[in-house]
Amino acid sequence: MFSVYLFQTAAQGRGKRVPMTPRQAAGDWKDLAEKASKEKDPAKLRALIQELIYSLAQEQRYYKDEIESRLDHHFRAMQSAPDPSGGS
Protein backbone atom coordinates (compact mmCIF):
# COMPACT_ATOMS: atom_id res chain seq x y z
CA MET A 1 0.00 0.00 0.00
CA PHE A 2 1.27 3.42 -0.91
CA SER A 3 1.83 5.76 2.03
CA VAL A 4 1.83 9.52 1.95
CA TYR A 5 4.13 11.39 4.29
CA LEU A 6 3.31 14.85 5.51
CA PHE A 7 5.51 17.19 7.44
CA GLN A 8 4.24 18.23 10.82
CA THR A 9 4.56 21.89 11.71
CA ALA A 10 7.26 22.98 14.10
CA ALA A 11 4.71 23.27 16.88
CA GLN A 12 3.63 19.67 16.26
CA GLY A 13 7.02 18.02 16.22
CA ARG A 14 9.83 19.83 14.42
CA GLY A 15 9.45 18.50 10.90
CA LYS A 16 8.85 14.82 11.67
CA ARG A 17 7.19 12.79 8.93
CA VAL A 18 3.92 11.09 9.68
CA PRO A 19 2.69 8.21 7.47
CA MET A 20 -0.80 8.72 6.06
CA THR A 21 -3.00 6.92 3.58
CA PRO A 22 -4.08 8.81 0.44
CA ARG A 23 -7.59 9.14 1.90
CA GLN A 24 -6.19 10.74 5.06
CA ALA A 25 -3.99 13.02 2.98
CA ALA A 26 -6.98 14.13 0.91
CA GLY A 27 -8.78 15.21 4.06
CA ASP A 28 -5.56 16.65 5.41
CA TRP A 29 -4.98 19.06 2.52
CA LYS A 30 -8.51 20.37 2.95
CA ASP A 31 -7.87 20.92 6.66
CA LEU A 32 -4.57 22.62 5.85
CA ALA A 33 -6.23 24.90 3.31
CA GLU A 34 -8.91 25.82 5.85
CA LYS A 35 -6.30 26.58 8.52
CA ALA A 36 -4.18 28.59 6.08
CA SER A 37 -7.18 30.70 5.06
CA LYS A 38 -7.61 31.78 8.68
CA GLU A 39 -3.98 32.04 9.80
CA LYS A 40 -2.72 35.55 10.58
CA ASP A 41 0.86 34.77 11.67
CA PRO A 42 3.16 34.88 8.59
CA ALA A 43 5.54 32.18 9.88
CA LYS A 44 2.69 29.79 10.68
CA LEU A 45 1.02 30.57 7.36
CA ARG A 46 4.26 29.79 5.51
CA ALA A 47 4.52 26.43 7.33
CA LEU A 48 0.90 25.59 6.54
CA ILE A 49 1.36 26.48 2.86
CA GLN A 50 4.48 24.30 2.66
CA GLU A 51 2.54 21.40 4.18
CA LEU A 52 -0.34 22.04 1.80
CA ILE A 53 1.93 22.02 -1.26
CA TYR A 54 3.62 18.81 -0.08
CA SER A 55 0.28 17.14 0.66
CA LEU A 56 -1.12 18.01 -2.77
CA ALA A 57 2.06 16.85 -4.53
CA GLN A 58 1.93 13.52 -2.71
CA GLU A 59 -1.72 13.02 -3.58
CA GLN A 60 -1.02 13.89 -7.22
CA ARG A 61 1.91 11.46 -7.30
CA TYR A 62 -0.26 8.70 -5.79
CA TYR A 63 -2.99 9.08 -8.41
CA LYS A 64 -0.48 9.39 -11.27
CA ASP A 65 1.20 6.16 -10.14
CA GLU A 66 -2.17 4.44 -9.70
CA ILE A 67 -3.30 5.39 -13.22
CA GLU A 68 0.01 4.29 -14.75
CA SER A 69 -0.20 0.97 -12.91
CA ARG A 70 -3.75 0.31 -14.07
CA LEU A 71 -2.93 1.23 -17.67
CA ASP A 72 0.13 -1.02 -17.61
CA HIS A 73 -1.96 -3.90 -16.25
CA HIS A 74 -4.65 -3.29 -18.89
CA PHE A 75 -2.16 -3.18 -21.79
CA ARG A 76 -0.42 -6.34 -20.59
CA ALA A 77 -3.78 -8.11 -20.39
CA MET A 78 -4.60 -6.97 -23.93
CA GLN A 79 -1.28 -8.22 -25.27
CA SER A 80 -1.68 -11.66 -23.72
CA ALA A 81 -5.32 -12.09 -24.81
CA PRO A 82 -6.00 -14.25 -27.86
CA ASP A 83 -6.86 -12.45 -31.11
CA PRO A 84 -10.70 -12.30 -31.28
CA SER A 85 -10.63 -12.43 -35.09
CA GLY A 86 -9.00 -15.85 -34.97
CA GLY A 87 -5.88 -14.63 -36.80
CA SER A 88 -2.40 -14.96 -35.43
Image (tube, rainbow, N blue to C red):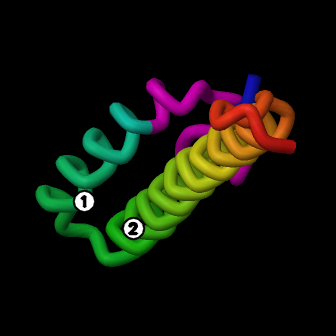
Tags 1 and 2 in contact by the CB under 8 Å rule?
yes
User: Of helix, strand and loop, which one carries label 2?
Assistant: helix
In the foreground, 87 or 11: 87
In the foreground, 59 or 45: 59
Q: Residue at x 14, y 60 (%)?
A: 37
Please, is residue 58 above or below residue 88 in the view?
below
Comes first in the chain, label 1 or label 2? 1
In the foreground, 38 or 65: 65
Q: Is residue 31 left or right of residue 60?
A: left
In the foreground, 61 or 49: 61
Please, is residue 44 above or below residue 63 in the view?
below
Q: Quadrant of the C terminus?
A: top right
How many residues crowd mark 2 within 10 Å: few (<14), some (14–19), many (20+)? some
How many residues crowd mark 1 within 10 Å: few (<14), some (14–19), many (20+)? some
Residue 1 position in % (x across, y down): 75, 22
Q: Is residue 15 left or right of residue 12?
A: right
- Which of the numbered marks, if any, corresponds to residue 36? 1
Q: What residue range appears in magenta?
A: 11-25
Query: How much space separates mark 1 and mark 2, taking CA atoms?
Result: 7 Å
Residue 10 appears anywhere in the view: no
Residue 22 position in % (x across, y down): 53, 32
**Mark 2 — residue?**
49
